Every structure is written in structure tokens, then in C-alpha cells.
Image (tube, rainbow, N blue to C red):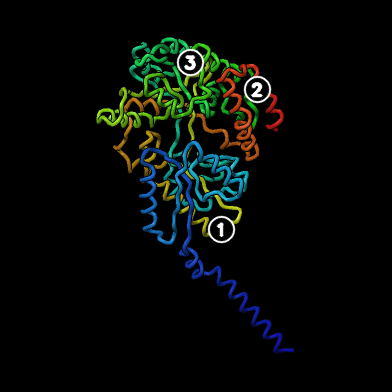
């Protein structure tokens, strides 16, 4: 009996020793250096972003040759749908370029990053910017820059109409003041077509979101999860938009205008002001003007003016801002902790000092001190645009989704897609009145936002 017992004990010790060896330093070293692939889905963040991305990946691979980075460049039009399908199927990419969103966290697939963040990384971020990648205090993304939504004007048209754009940049303007200006900006374009005061696209929610934030509503919900679009404020906002179309200040076919068409109208002088505009438009238009001088593009050269979104009379001015960068995910078939660590290594490489080129190209505030130092003296925007962007940043409205619990955040996203988007298109097309839409918001909110 003793020999079998001794043999069993010896075998158990061997098994324990072998299992323990898997967590030893030698095995960890092997695992850390094992070949791995990290997938990245991203967008053309600026005109040469793909070239920049390739360079960042090449730099990363010099120190981590065992990690292959596979990227896919999505289109702004179709990319979000493709990502949502992949996420819902439980197979998102490891890294996705986007703002953090509570709806992502609700899936259970967003990768929490706090355990990977070193003090060196945390201290590199400008105070208040690392938080732009957090949901309720937990880190899920690393911001690459602070996005900023605004309106943009054609300097020639504004000045010909007697609009003091410098004063607007410095002091802002109200809806009443915009209506007065819009009457002067509506007329005939140089090519004989109608010149509208304002053009936006009919496919996104940017327009209504910017205006509601400038009428005392941070979003569909506030930071406490309370429904906001249920009183006179939303009706006033819808009525303001409806009046812009009725007066001919915006095209009656706005519902059918795609983002590219909106830009074409602005370039053609058929619109004095475009929404939404980013500070990056300054760089885009400078490059377009160079192409016109070189004879490779036909059209009128434009001087760009960055403008704040007007606010309702009596309401506080607000600038829609937040953080955009990479958000990390795991998959339904989890690839393990070492893969998660590798994902974070790639994420940090795509968000570091050299990656600050995106903020520089887009004329947006840097989020990391190392980025500001790397690109010091290399700014691409005009002084007027940079100054205007900085003044608008003083009125930042932090995205509500960063404060909401994940259930509320997911509900808000669903409400926007299923209720807000079709109603805004119906407003643009004249199919529904502001009153009908406001009532629909309240009724649907009672069903969906519980």
C-alpha cells in the first residue's frame, strides 16, 4: 500500500510543480514574447492619417516585432454600422477609433484599462483630458485629441453682408442675432443659384445636438439620467430650426443633403455658413486654395472663419467638445490577459507624443504634454482660428454619456437612433411640425427611457 501512495503523492507534486511553473518568470517571459496580432479599426482622421498610422505602427514594431498590427481604414458613412454589427456579434476589433460610450461598456466587451495605466502615462495627460476616456471614473479609452464642433463661415460673404465675425468669435451670438444676420446672408450666389445663410446635412444628429446644448439641454438626458427633451426648450429649438427652413435661410431639401453635398455647397459659395464645422476646415481650405492656385482644382478661393454655435436668448453658450481616440475591446472568445496587455501597448503607441500630429492637423487642443512639446511651433491653423477655438473651449459641454450609468447610456443611444433621427429628418422635410415631434419625443421617452 505504501508504494502506490508514495507514487500518487509524487505524481501530485509533479502536477503542482508543472502548474506552478506556468506562472513563473520564465513562462511569463515566453508568453510576453509570443507572436500575437492586434486588430485596429480606424477612420481617415485627417487627410494623411493613414500614412501617419503606418509610421506609428512601424515605430512600434521596432520595439515589439512579435506583435503584428493589422488595421482597417473605415469610411465615416459605413464604419459605425460595421462596428456595431461586429460588437453585437461579440467580435469587435481590439481597438476602435471613437469616443468612449456607455453603450459599449454595457456589452461587457469594453476593456477596462486602469490596471495598465502607469503614473508616467497619467501624468503626461493635460489635466481633465484623460477623463474624456472614462465612463463613471473607469478608463476605457485613450483620447487622441479634444474634438470641437462649431459652425464655419465664408469670410467674403460675411463681410459683404456687414457681419462682424470677429465680434461673434469673441462674444458669441444669440438665435435672434443669427436670424438678423441670416436675412442679410440669404440671396444669390455668384453662379446665379440661391445663396443660403446656412447649410447642414440631413443625415446626422450633430445639428440638433449643438442647438439643444445651446438651449440649456446637455443632451437627451442630463448627467443624472433625467430626460430633458420634454418641455418648452425642445419645442423652442425645433421651432427655431423650422423657421430657418420656412424663411429660406436653409434649403428646403435639407433632409436629402449628404455631408459631401453640404461641403460642396459651401465651397461653391451657395452657403455663407456651414454646420458642423471643425477647426480643421481651416487647414482643409488652405490646402484647397493651394490646389486652386496650382490649377488642379477649379473654384473660388475661400477664407475660413470659425464661428461659435448661436445660443437661445437667455441661455448660456455651450461648445460641444469631448475626447476622440482609441477604445479597447475584448471578444466573446476572450484571447487572454497577455493579448489585452499587447492591445494596450498598441493603443499607447497610437496615442503618444508623435500621434499628436492628429491634433495639430485638426487644429484641436492637445491632450498630452508630450504632444504639445513635440509639435511646438508647428501649428497649421491661422491665428484667428486658433484664438477662436480657444475661446470656444472656455464654454465646453462635457459629453453626458461619460457620467451616465451604462444602462442609461445605452437607452439614450437607442432613443437617438430610433426616435430622434427620423423625427429630425421629418422636420427638415416638413412632414411633421415641431409640436408633433415634441409630443413624440415625450411619448417615446416614457416607453424607452425608464
Q: Quadrant of the C terminus?
A: top right
- Dot 1 falls on a residue whose secondary structure is loop
Between marks 3 and 1 in the image, the one whose residue lies nearer the viewer: 1
| 209 relative to 47, above or below | above
Image location (x, y in percent) of residue 156: 33, 17
Mark closest to the chain's N terminus, 3 or 1: 3
Label ID, residue 174: 3
Distance Cα–Cα, label 3 vs label 1: 53 Å
- Dot 3 falls on a residue whose secondary structure is loop
Q: Residue, x 39% and y 54% (percent of image)?
A: 60
Mark closest to the chain's N terminus, 2 or 3: 3
Distance Cα–Cα, label 2 vs label 1: 45 Å
Q: Residues within 10 Å of mark 2 (few under 14, many from 20)?
A: some
| Residue 128 visible in image | no
Q: Nearer the viewer, residue 9 or 151?
A: 151
Q: What residue would you read off at disc 1?
A: 335
Q: Residue, x 37% and y 17% (percent of image)?
A: 165
Q: Residue, x 62% and y 43% (percent of image)?
A: 106
Between marks 2 and 1 in the image, the one whose residue lies nearer the viewer: 1
Callout 3–callout 1 Cβ contact below 8 Å? no
| 305 relative to 29, above or below | above
**Extreme residue in the left direction:** 294
Q: Residues within 10 Å of mark 1 (few under 14, many from 20)?
A: few
| Residue 254 visible in image | yes
Q: Residue, x 55% and y 68% (percent of image)?
A: 23
Q: What residue would you read off at disc 2?
A: 230
| Residue 431 located left or right of residue 446 | left
Amino acid at each position: 500500500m505504501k508504494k502506490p501512495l508514495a507514487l500518487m503523492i509524487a505524481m501530485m507534486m509533479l502536477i503542482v510543480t508543472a502548474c506552478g511553473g506556468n506562472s513563473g518568470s520564465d513562462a511569463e517571459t515566453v508568453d510576453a514574447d509570443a507572436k500575437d496580432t492586434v486588430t485596429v479599426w480606424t477612420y481617415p482622421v485627417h487627410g494623411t492619417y493613414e500614412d501617419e498610422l503606418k509610421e506609428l505602427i512601424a515605430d512600434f514594431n521596432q520595439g515589439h516585432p512579435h506583435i503584428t498590427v493589422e488595421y482597417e481604414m473605415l469610411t465615416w458613412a459605413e464604419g459605425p454600422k460595421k462596428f456595431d454589427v461586429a460588437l453585437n456579434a461579440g467580435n469587435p476589433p481590439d481597438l476602435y477609433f471613437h469616443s468612449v460610450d456607455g453603450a459599449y461598456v454595457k456589452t461587457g466587451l469594453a476593456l477596462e484599462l486602469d490596471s495598465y495605466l502607469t503614473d508616467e502615462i497619467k501624468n503626461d495627460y493635460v489635466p481633465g483630458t484623460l477623463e474624456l476616456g472614462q465612463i463613471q471614473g473607469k478608463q476605457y479609452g485613450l483620447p487622441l485629441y479634444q474634438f470641437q464642433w462649431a459652425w464655419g463661415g465664408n469670410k467674403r460673404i460675411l463681410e459683404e453682408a456687414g457681419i462682424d465675425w470677429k465680434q461673434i468669435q469673441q462674444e458669441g451670438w444669440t438665435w435672434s442675432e443669427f436670424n438678423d444676420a441670416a436675412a442679410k446672408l440669404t440671396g444669390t450666389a455668384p453662379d446665379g443659384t440661391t445663396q443660403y445663410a446656412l447649410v447642414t446635412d440631413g443625415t446626422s444628429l450633430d445639428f440638433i445636438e449643438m442647438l439643444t446644448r445651446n438651449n440649456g439641454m446637455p443632451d437627451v438626458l442630463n448627467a443624472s439620467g433625467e430626460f430633458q427633451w420634454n418641455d418648452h426648450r425642445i419645442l423652442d429649438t425645433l421651432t427655431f430650426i423650422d423657421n430657418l427652413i420656412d424663411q429660406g435661410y436653409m434649403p428646403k431639401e435639407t433632409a436629402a443633403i449628404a455631408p459631401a453635398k453640404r461641403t460642396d455647397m459651401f465651397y461653391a459659395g451657395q452657403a455663407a455658413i456651414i454646420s458642423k464645422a471643425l477647426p480643421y476646415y481651416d487647414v482643409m481650405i488652405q490646402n484647397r486654395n493651394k490646389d486652386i492656385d496650382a490649377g488642379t482644382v477649379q473654384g473660388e478661393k475661400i477664407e475660413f472663419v470659425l464661428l461659435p454655435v448661436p445660443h437661445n436668448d437667455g441661455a448660456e453658450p455651450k461648445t460641444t467638445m469631448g475626447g476622440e481616440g482609441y477604445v479597447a475591446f475584448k471578444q466573446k472568445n476572450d484571447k487572454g490577459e497577455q493579448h489585452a496587455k499587447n492591445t494596450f501597448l498598441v493603443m499607447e503607441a497610437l496615442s503618444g507624443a508623435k500621434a499628436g500630429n492628429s491634433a495639430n492637423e485638426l487644429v484641436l487642443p492637445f491632450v498630452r504634454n508630450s504632444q504639445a512639446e513635440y509639435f511646438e511651433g508647428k501649428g497649421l491653423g491661422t491665428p484667428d482660428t486658433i484664438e477662436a477655438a480657444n475661446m470656444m473651449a472656455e464654454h465646453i459641454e462635457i459629453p453626458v454619456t461619460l457620467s451616465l450609468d451604462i444602462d442609461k447610456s445605452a437607452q439614450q443611444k437607442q432613443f437617438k437612433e430610433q426616435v430622434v433621427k427620423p423625427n429630425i429628418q421629418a422636420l427638415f422635410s416638413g412632414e411633421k411640425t415641431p409640436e408633433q415631434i415634441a409630443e413624440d419625443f415625450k411619448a417615446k421617452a416614457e416607453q424607452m427611457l425608464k
